[in-house]
Image (spheres, rainbow, N blue to C red):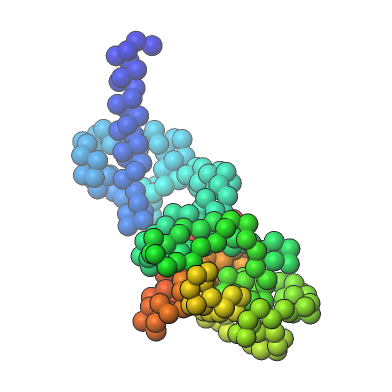
Amino acid sequence: MSPSSAASGRVVLAKALDVLFAFDEKHPELTVQEIAERVEQPKSTVYRYLALLAEKGLLERGSAEHRYRLGLRILELSRLVRQQLSLADLALPVMREIAAASEETVMLAIPEKARVICVEQVESHQSLRVSFARGMTFPFHASSPSKALLAFQEPAFVEQILAGELERYTDRTVTDRERLKEELHEIRANGYCVVWGELASSITGNPAPIAGVSAAIIDPRGYGVASLNICLPSFRLTPECTESLIRLVRDGASRISQLVD
């Protein structure tokens, strides 16, 4: 292939991709005229690219005549991308957004047998902050990351955890089984968990207990596969702050849940 032919091919590919990228969340369907305006190309040119993209399954006819939308081939490709990404990979962009908005540490935890394990975090830049080492584990009955997850596990597993030893770590650790059941029911109903001082009575080097605001990441079966957590010194968890963090963590967990197969 000559250099001029290669350059021409790149131009054609770029223009075809421009047509594909004209679609977004706010514009799931577009007319030919709308696409032409968004990519700044003549309709005659757009028609050629639409025909090519439709032939490959990347676009398809929309709900009305002369309207187009993304095709099923896009869905197949997106599934392939998600299969190649770990849950932490999927969650990290959302975690960074929440960390920037809250200015607090954001942590991702997953269930691992009878414990909960930290697999990723985006650390706060504040001088007094909460930090977790990747691989750090938590008991299922204490801490917000754990309770947010336990509330969305299979009933038999929940009963197994509650029937086991419920160690008391601080004077705020809940070890009464009936009270724990009530808390888990409330977490399922509300979709979030707010806990402080259950696992450690203070942050290293400071007497402030650790607080957590957490929500479960749910798979298509309705079970928790991870918890998304905002962790901070308890003195910063004011009522106004709590409401804001709940919104952030619930929205973030919902967004990540949509990516979980």
At 48% from the left edge and 73% from the top edge, which residue is drawn? 206
At 24% from the left edge and 34% from the top edge, which residue is drawn? 44
Between 53 and 135, the residue placed more toward the observer is 135
Question: Residue 147: percent from the left, percent from the top?
Answer: 61, 75
Q: Outermost residue toward the top?
A: 2
127 sits left or right of 141 in the view: left
Between 256 and 21, the residue placed more toward the observer is 256
Q: Quadrant of residue 176?
A: bottom right
Establish if 15 lies above or below 162. Answer: above
37 sits left or right of 124 in the view: left
How many numbered markers are drawn? 0
Establish if 248 lies above or below 35. Answer: below
At 46% from the left edge and 64% from the top edge, which residue is drawn? 105
In this view of the protein, can residue 152 be seen by the observer?
A: no
At 65% from the left edge and 68% from the top edge, which residue is drawn? 138
Q: Quadrant of residue 180?
A: bottom right
Between 22 and 112, the residue placed more toward the observer is 112
In this view of the protein, can residue 177 be seen by the observer?
A: yes
Question: Residue 29: percent from the left, percent from the top?
Answer: 34, 52
Between 120 and 252, the residue placed more toward the observer is 120
Q: Quadrant of residue 14?
A: top left
127 sits left or right of 149 in the view: left
Question: Residue 134: percent from the left, percent from the top?
Answer: 58, 56
Q: Quadrant of the N terminus?
A: top left
Q: Outermost residue toward the front?
A: 205
Question: Residue 156: percent from the left, percent from the top?
Answer: 76, 74
229 sits left or right of 118 in the view: left
Q: Quadrant of the C terminus?
A: bottom right
